Each structure stands twice: as C-alpha cells, then as structure tokens.
C-alpha cells in the first residue's frame, strides 16, 4: 500500500491526530477570511489649497478688509476611508496592514455614528464649527473684529475638524501675509493638519502618516502638525517633506516666518 512507502513520522497516530485537528482550524480560517470585519480601511485623501479653489469654488471669500495677492499654497489634507456600511474581509485588512499607504482602524473610531447619514451629518457639522473657530482664531491673531471682517469658507465635501489650522493660516496670508510685506508661504507648497479653537490652540487629529503621504503626493514640501503628534509624523515620512510641530497658530506663523528668513525652525 502507498502508506507503507511513507516515512514513519507521517503515518504515526500523533501526526494523523494533528492532521485531523488542523482541518477544522483551516476551515474556520477560510470562512473568517471572507467574513466582514468591523474595520475601516484608510488611505491618503485629497488636499485643498485654502488660498485657491477646490472643486471649482473659491475656498476663502473674505470681505470687509483689503486683501493681498498670494503665491504658494496652504493645503488642508484629508484621509479617505471606506464607508461605515462597507464591511471589509480579513484579506482586505491583511493587505492594508502590509501597505504603508493604508491603515486599518476600528470602524467605531472613525464613524462613532453607525448610520451613514448621521456620520456624514456629524463630519459636516464638525467642519462648520472648525471654520468658525479658524475665522475667529485668525481675526484674533490679526486684531480684527469679526463684526467688520466676514469670512466664507467653501470646502465642498470635505468634513471633520482637522482643517482648522490651515484655514486660519489661509485667512492670515490673504489679509497680511507674513506681516512684513512678504508671503507667509514664501512661495512654497505648505500642507498641514490640526484642529484649532478661537484662542488659536492647535489640537491633534490622527491619521498623520496618511496625511503626510497625501501632502507629498500633491507637491507639498512643508508639513505643519500638532507637536503632540510628532511621533506619528515620523512614521513613513515621505522624502523631501519637512515636518514642523506647533502648539498654537502663533507658532505656525512664526515657524513659516523663520523658514522664509533662514531662522531656526522647529522640527520633530
């Protein structure tokens, strides 16, 4: 018989028992590979220049004060995520884990609202609040009254609070530049992320490694981020992208001024 020609190790009772035990385990793994899991897959998203247009609409419309011509770019960066109703399989998750330009995150962390419509409503509401805070932070920095200066923001379908810092910098650049007659950007393509409150404090947002990828893909050479997320910023940082950590809006302006003048610039 064929089994008589096999090595004893392959025909022993112990080997046969292990083989029989392995069959249900393999079957369970095969099923699990295709069962939807409660994870969301993220990847680098689109960016929007606050000094220009997004999807054909001007991002910042400012009235009540003289404006400057600007050069360079100040980019809001985003992360793309699979929608909350999409369930990804184990194979999808494993492929994303192996890809430095993707991430696997529990769905409930990305979409606390399980209802897709409610999730979208929440992110748009967060963006509206972020726009209001960015406007107040910028005008407070410039010592201008929100009763005299009006700012309208149009970022299309971009939601969430993480664009606050870059919106505030865009308002400052359009009104006063670097404060000395020059460009706040120095003509560079600057990207960044971070929430902001009316007092100009920059807060952490998450998704930094994917946002640096998005920034680099759209030509940025400088990336502003909350100081508390420096460690995340250094994960798979694209070549040629300078990370600048900040705590406040004033820090951001000062760092860009130093970058333009050749002064000392904070780094992660």
Image (cartoon, rainbow, N blue to C red):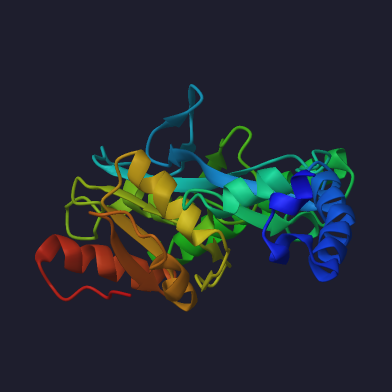
Q: How many marks?
A: 0
- Reply above or below: 165 against 73: below
In this view, the residue in front, 116 or 254, is 116
Residue placed furthest toward the left: 262
- For the N terminus, the image quarter is top right
Residue 146 in view here: no
Left or right: 38 as drawn, with respect to 245: right
Residue 159 % position (x, y): 65, 44
In-front residue for pair 140/122: 122
Q: Quadrant of residue 238?
A: bottom left
Q: Residue at x 75, y 39 (%)?
A: 83
- Closer to the camera in the image, 10 or 118: 10
**Residue at image point 37% right, 62% down:** 224
List x then y, in percent, for residue 145: 50, 59
Taking depth in this image into account, of 251 and 68 the one nearest to the observer is 251
Q: Is residue 156 above or below residue 150?
A: above
Is residue 48 visible in the rendered image? The answer is yes
């Amino acid at each position: 018989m064929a089994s008589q020609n096999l090595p004893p190790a392959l025909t022993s009772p112990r080997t046969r028992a292990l083989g029989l035990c392995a069959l249900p385990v393999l079957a369970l793994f095969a099923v699990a590979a295709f069962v939807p899991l409660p994870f969301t897959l993220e990847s680098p998203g689109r960016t929007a220049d606050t000094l220009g247009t997004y999807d054909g609409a001007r991002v910042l419309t400012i009235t009540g004060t003289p404006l400057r011509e600007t050069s360079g770019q100040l980019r809001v960066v985003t992360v793309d995520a699979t929608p909350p109703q999409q369930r990804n399989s184990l194979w999808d998750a494993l492929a994303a884990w192996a890809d430095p330009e993707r991430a696997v995150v529990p769905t409930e962390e990305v979409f606390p609202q399980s209802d897709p419509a409610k999730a979208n409503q929440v992110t748009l509401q967060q963006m509206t609040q972020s726009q209001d805070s960015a406007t107040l932070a910028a005008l407070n920095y410039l010592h201008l009254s929100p009763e005299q200066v009006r700012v309208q923001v149009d970022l299309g379908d971009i939601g969430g609070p993480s664009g606050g810092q870059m919106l505030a910098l865009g308002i400052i650049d359009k009104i006063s530049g670097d404060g000395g007659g020059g460009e706040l950007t120095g003509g560079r393509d600057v990207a960044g992320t971070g929430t902001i409150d009316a007092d100009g404090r920059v807060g952490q947002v998450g998704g930094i490694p994917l946002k640096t990828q998005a920034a680099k893909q759209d030509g940025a050479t400088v990336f502003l981020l909350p100081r508390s997320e420096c460690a995340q910023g250094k994960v798979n940082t694209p070549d040629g992208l300078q990370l600048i950590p900040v705590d406040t809006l004033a820090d951001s302006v000062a760092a860009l001024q130093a970058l333009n003048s050749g002064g000392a610039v904070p780094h992660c």
